[in-house]
Image (tube, rainbow, N blue to C red):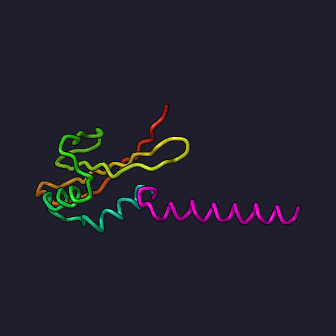
Amino acid sequence: MALKGRLFAVALAALGLILGGLTVANPLRRPEAGVSSWLAKRTPLGSSWERVRDVAQQHGWYNPNLQGSDGRTSGPYIRGELGRYWSVPFYTYVTVFWEFDSSNRLANIRIWKTVDSI
């Protein structure tokens, strides 16, 4: 019996390491502030509207037909669909709003997470 208990503990620890690794490997699983910081390395504050759009297009985040607001945006912005991840029992979708000032320079990166449910 002691051997079965040890094997179970080792399997449980391995599962924990795998799930922990998935969380670290996928930046979308980070809290909104963490996702925003991750994006700021690619699109620093002060970047031009064109530069942000180009980066978003290169990564497949930008779709010119999906530029609707979530009701919290004001002024010029670019909406990007970063992707989704499985968060039991539903998917979580991660959207970014790059918000620009009156000079079309990036002033804020705001993350919006929504959970798909039944």
Q: Which residues are drawn in magenta?
A: 1-30
How many numbered circles are shown? Answer: 0
**In the displayed structure, does residue 45 sit left or right of residue 24?**
left
Q: Magenta span has 33?
A: no
What residue is shown at x 60% (from left), y 65% (from top)? Answer: 17
Q: Magenta span has 8?
A: yes
Please tell me in which quadrant of the rendered image residue 53 appears. Answer: bottom left
Q: Which of 102 and 54 lies nearest the eye of the viewer?
A: 54
Q: Is residue 31 above or below residue 117?
A: below
Where residue 85 appears, as percent x and y from the top left, is 45, 50
Classified by dominant secondary structure, the portion drawn in magenta counts as helix
Q: Which of 111 and 20 lies nearest the eye of the viewer?
A: 20
Where residue 42 appears, as percent x and y from the top left, is 27, 66
What residue is shown at x 33% (from left), y 48% (from top)? Answer: 95
Please tell me in which quadrant of the rendered image residue 116 appears. Answer: top left
Where residue 57 appears, as percent x and y from the top left, is 20, 55
